[in-house]
Image: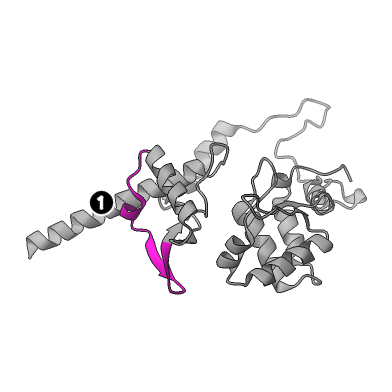
Amino acid sequence: MSGARPFRDVKLQWLQQLSCDKDLSDSARSVALYIITTHLNGHTEKAWPSYQTIADATGKSVKTIQRAVRELEVKGWFEVQRGNGVGHNTEYRPSAASILRASDAREKTDKVVTLYPDKGGQNRPERRSDVSGEGGQIRPPNLEKEKINKPNAREDAPPRVETRRAVPLVFVAETKARQIEQWRGWLIDQGMPALEKLGLRTMKCGKCGYMLPGHWPPDSSNPSAVEWLTFFRQRLDEIAKEGARQTEVRRAS
């Protein structure tokens, strides 16, 4: 074991081990997955969503969230520093022990497999070039000749279609006035129109609100800031295209 790596390098192994922990309740596993995939800062390796934020996102009660957090702490998945409830939320970070386990799993997958059969590895592939039987040098392959004789498989391949990864959205109720106001201010700072003009207003569980990329706008150190800004710009393009289409329909009729 070579020691713990940065969490961002072993995040996949950490999540795999969490998912396979049979002693963990479904509520605790759901809370852990939400914190890691939605709120964890990749640089500080910390997250600080409130109990109410986690409850709204997972559909569970605040008391259930508190029990789940305690379980994650006791079973060694998180180090939890509880806040005072007045502008200081509880702070979460993956425990050092869990990161070390994930680092060990990552190290095993990174090991190079030997190519010699007598050491339990795979068979060594044959050389493509010929070797002189009289002790001469290795003759390199004629790449130009192979290029001429070998058909190019890409010539008949269909054109590559670029796909865009969808940005996961969370519901922010209008009753979360502080969060909504911070989103409005962030959009204005980015040269974007008002939040109401982005077509993200919706209703969930009888509450009015907005589907947004996060519960809070990103700060300058958040790597998701560019991706979220691109999402809002694409929303504006979609709204403009839809407006143009409706205009054409009205003219045609």
Q: Along the horizontal axis of the image, is 176 left or right of 100?
A: left
User: Is 198 covered by the magenta stretch?
Assistant: yes
Q: Quadrant of the C terminus?
A: bottom left
| Image position, residue 121 (x, y; %) | 85, 51
Occupied quadrant, residue 131? top right
Highlighted range, magenta: 191-209
Q: Amino acid at mark 1?
A: Ala
Query: What residue is drawn where x is 56% and y is 65%?
Result: 57
Q: Is residue 156 above or below residue 202?
A: above
Query: What residue is drawn where x is 55% and y is 34%?
Result: 145
Task: Using the image as rendered, state which of residue 96 and residue 57 is in the foreground.
Answer: 57
Q: Along the horizontal axis of the image, is 192 left or right of 170?
A: left
Q: Is residue 112 above or below residue 54?
A: above
Q: Is residue 134 above or below residue 178?
A: above
Occupied quadrant, residue 78? bottom right
| Image position, residue 9 (x, y; %) | 71, 45
> Residue farthest to the right?
118
Task: Using the image as rendered, state which of residue 99 and residue 90 is in the foreground.
Answer: 90
Q: Element at badge 1?
A: helix
Q: Along the horizontal axis of the image, is 243 left or right of 10?
A: left
Q: Which residue is mark 1?
A: 240
Query: What residue is drawn where x is 71% and y is 36%?
Result: 129
| Image position, residue 220 (x, y; %) | 54, 36
Q: Along the horizontal axis of the image, is 70 left or right of 30?
A: right
| Image position, residue 39 (x, y; %) | 61, 52
